[in-house]
Amino acid sequence: MGSRAFGLATDGSDTDRRGVYVAPTPLFWGFTKPPTHVDGPAEEQFSWELERFCDLALRANPNLLECLHSPLVERLDDTGRELLALRDAFLSRRVHATFRGYAAQQLHKLEGDIRNHGAPRWKHAMHLLRLLISCRDVLRGGELRIDVGEHRERLLAVKRGEVSWDAVRVWMTELHDAADAAVGGSPLPAEPDRARVEDFLIRVRRASAGAPDPVAASDAVPQGAEPQ
């Protein structure tokens, strides 16, 4: 994730890694539950347990949705492949509120930096603009693409402090207005496909517990036939 996934990496960029893991189902049966997330073991590495990941992604959390659409994947098993195949089930018009809400929080912090230090943290301003671009584009086209593409050089100029704060605010306002205009006619559904995601999660939990899938079992034995 981070600048490398967004197409904004430079020579000094860190490598941010995010992951998803499945806690063994029997660990949920006792009073002490498995962790919902894990830091490490490498630097700049963070992972979510599958249920927590799905829950946050269904709420259109920007960080989680971006993970699902990263073009850089280092390790993927069968469960991970099925999760990525469900990417569209998590997308909905909720992104308008969540992306905009996150952007508003970051803008408040940037304005606090200006009041306290005379200038914003330009790297954070760059990523705020990147988020607003993603919000506008996913609402317009129904697909979340996190690589900034043609906006790379302009965004890096913001990061270097080569663009005035007034010009940055104008760009932010334009992106806000464009997202607001796009949401009404967006091809995205009003709500995510929660049932589809929950079906996936239950099947993963059953497999981890060693329990048979009742749907698969019923398909295997024709109605009215006796199992051999």
Image (cartoon, rainbow, N blue to C red):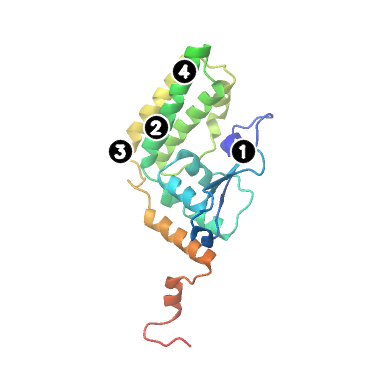
* Residue found 54% across the figure and 49% down from its top: 35
The percent coordinates of residue 85 (x first, y second) are 49, 55
Residue 53 lies left or right of residue 71; in this view the side is left
Residue at the front extreme, as displayed: 31
Question: 82 above or below 211?
Answer: above
Q: Position of residue 222 (x, y in %)?
A: 41, 82
Mark toward the start of the polypeptide (4 vs 1): 1
Nearer-N-terminus badge (2/4): 2
Element carrying mark 2:
helix
Crowding at dot 3, Cα within 10 Å, few <14 / some 14-19 / many 20+, comes out as few
How far apart are labels 4 and 3 at the CA level?
A: 32 Å
| Alpha-carbon span between mark 1 and mark 2 | 23 Å
What residue sits right under mark 3 in the picture? 184
Alpha carbons under labels 2 and 4: distance apart: 17 Å
Q: Mark 2: which amino acid?
A: Gly
Residue 12 image point, x, y percent: 68, 29
On residue 112, the disc is 4
Viewer-nearest of discs 2 and 3:
2
